[in-house]
Amino acid sequence: AAIIFGGAFVWRLSTAIEPLIPLAILATPEARIGIAANAFGWGAIIGLNIFLPMYLQSAVGMTATHSGVSLMVLMVALNVSAGISGQLLGRVKRYKLVPMLGLGAAVVAIFTLACRADRVTPLEFEIMVALFGLGFGPLPPLCKTVVQNSVAVLHLGAAIGTMTFLRHLFPTMLVAVFGAIVM
């Protein structure tokens, strides 16, 4: 059913006078990759925000309040990193290197957290979550810049709207998938 409805959606977009998502936006490989990277990255962030407190309560034994507060480190690190990298991207010659190194650090942090899940201390948890936030932070500003620079000016608003729409849609679907795996 999803394939049929997805195909019907794409067909309708291609025939509409003013489509919800102009397909010309997705025809640009840079925009397509930037939108997908942003959507999947936010899927991971939202998934962590939902499932990490459950893990901390059930496996580590934290209270609901303490497990929720422990995720503040993730969000603070993410926002600080995004703000700094947004300023840094325009000042460095190899601007793609900053998010790529950050994502590498984020993957290592989450992998380490997954491998040590049964014996992680609260301090180690906070360090891994902070590293994940710092590593993911540069991705959204880069994705937005890539999308803005790769589409025609007349599609700029629709491209950013599409990126925002998919940033909310993909996490919803990924959380359902993560939930099916976890439960």
Image (cartoon, rainbow, N blue to C red):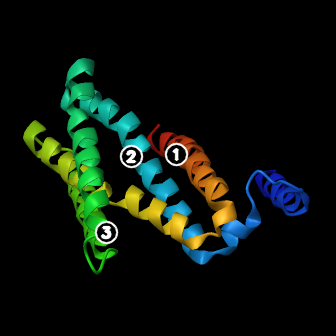
Residue drawn at point x = 61 percent, y = 46 percent: 165
Secondary structure beneath label 3: loop
Q: Residues within 10 Å of mark 3 (few under 14, many from 20)?
A: few
| 28 over 127 or under it: above or below | below
Quarter location, residue 52: top left
Front residue of this view, candidates 4 and 158: 158
Front residue of this view, candidates 165 and 61: 165
Sequence order check, earlier mark of 1 and 3: 3
Q: Which residue is mark 3?
A: 90
CA–CA distance between discs 2 and 3? 25 Å
Pointers 2 and 1 in contact (CB under 8 A)?
A: yes
* Position of residue 148 in the picture relative to residue 21 (left or right): left
Amino acid on which the number 1 mark rests in the picture: Pro
Amino acid on which the number 2 mark rests in the picture: Ile
* Position of residue 28 in the picture relative to residue 68 (left or right): right
Give the total number of marks visible in the rendering: 3
Quarter location, residue 53: top left
Q: Residues within 10 Å of mark 2 (few under 14, many from 20)?
A: some
Amino acid on which the number 3 mark rests in the picture: Gly
Residue drawn at point x = 47 percent, y = 37 percent: 183
Q: Which residue is mark 2?
A: 45
Sequence order check, earlier mark of 2 and 3: 2
Q: Which residue is mark 1?
A: 171
Q: Is residue 167 visible?
A: yes
Q: Nearer the viewer, mark 2 or mark 3?
A: 3
